[in-house]
Image: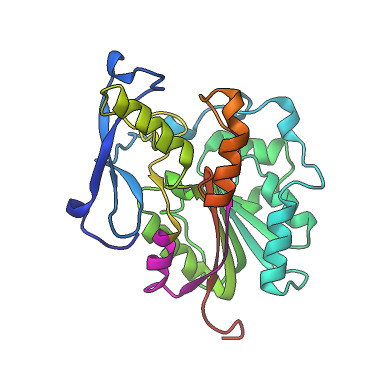
Amino acid sequence: MCGADTSRAKVLGQRLNRSQGMCPKALPGITVSVLKCGDCGLIFSNPLPKPENIQDHYGAEPESYWNEDYFQVSPDYFREEIDTAKRLLGFEEGMTSLDIGSGIGKGIVAQRNAGFDAYGLEPSDTFRKAAIERMGVPEERIFGAMLEEAEFKENSFDFVTFGAVLEHLYDPSESIRRVLSWLRPSGVMHIEVPSADYLVNRIANAFYRFSGSSFVSNISPMHRPFHLYEFALESFTRHARDNRYEIAEHTHYVGPIYNIPAFAHGPLKKIMRWGKSGMQLTVWLRKTGDRNQ
């Protein structure tokens, strides 16, 4: 993200190609090194494992990911994000939007219901099929392609959302630049990513070190959910300097806590809210320039 040489990054430890549990060193499997950039705080694996086919990762049936209730779009679905986008844009009816990684199309439906001229991009064949057949998204409104292969005209969209997507892409820096070219000047981009400052990960890593293990709990490059990166706010701050955007807003989401006794959840959540060290970082990027250009 910041362009720093990976040779200067700090090795945090190793990540197993499966769920690790309390004692990963006792489990069979393949490991990959996990590093942290000393300049921008980005956490990543080295090397980056790649599937032979993207459908090996994301070609599963939607019903294996979600229960039946998920295939409903409530009036509040994606409401907070849509309201923020409208406020930042100075919304006008018919503004265009693109939902990247649109899954079964709920975001497209929600944005269309909110007055956007909404489109989606989804690389999973099975998810795109569900969006069309189960959610009623018109086939021409959801493109079946990976972001790296998709083609849109410059300045096509007012609003682009990257909900839980950027951490799966092999070159997040280039992905942002590519999407910026599709975004109109003064348009906004919504990105949600795992936070590199997540307190629970730091606690887990301390436990591993105390038990004499070199493993860490960050990312999951070789097993679901196939997270390749965790991002710090500084990752975007530095990237913005050379890439025609500014950070309009950012927030941290605490989220649920797993694998830690329940009595500690309350205090930990208070600490994470105070220290901005929750599990998820949300950034709103605004493309610099005049919308009338």
Rendered position, 154 above or below 81: below
Q: State which region is magenta.
A: 234-256
Q: Quadrant of residue 22?
A: top left
Taking the magenta stretch, the answer to whether it contains residue 246 is: yes
Rendered position, 139 above or below 160: above
Task: Tell me the quarter of the image containing the N terminus.
Answer: bottom left
Q: Residue furthest left?
A: 7
Q: Is residue 57 left or right of residue 137?
A: left
Task: Tell me the quarter of the image containing the C terminus.
Answer: bottom right
Q: Position of residue 254 (x, y in %)?
A: 59, 43
Q: Position of residue 119 (x, y in %)?
A: 64, 56
Rendered position, 288 above or below 6: below
Please tell me which residue lies in front, 56 or 5: 5
Residue drawn at (27%, 35%) of the image = 13
Residue drawn at (44%, 75%) of the image = 244
**Visible in this render: residue 16?**
no
Q: Residue furthest right?
A: 75
Q: How many marks?
A: 0
Q: Is residue 2 left or right of residue 107?
A: left
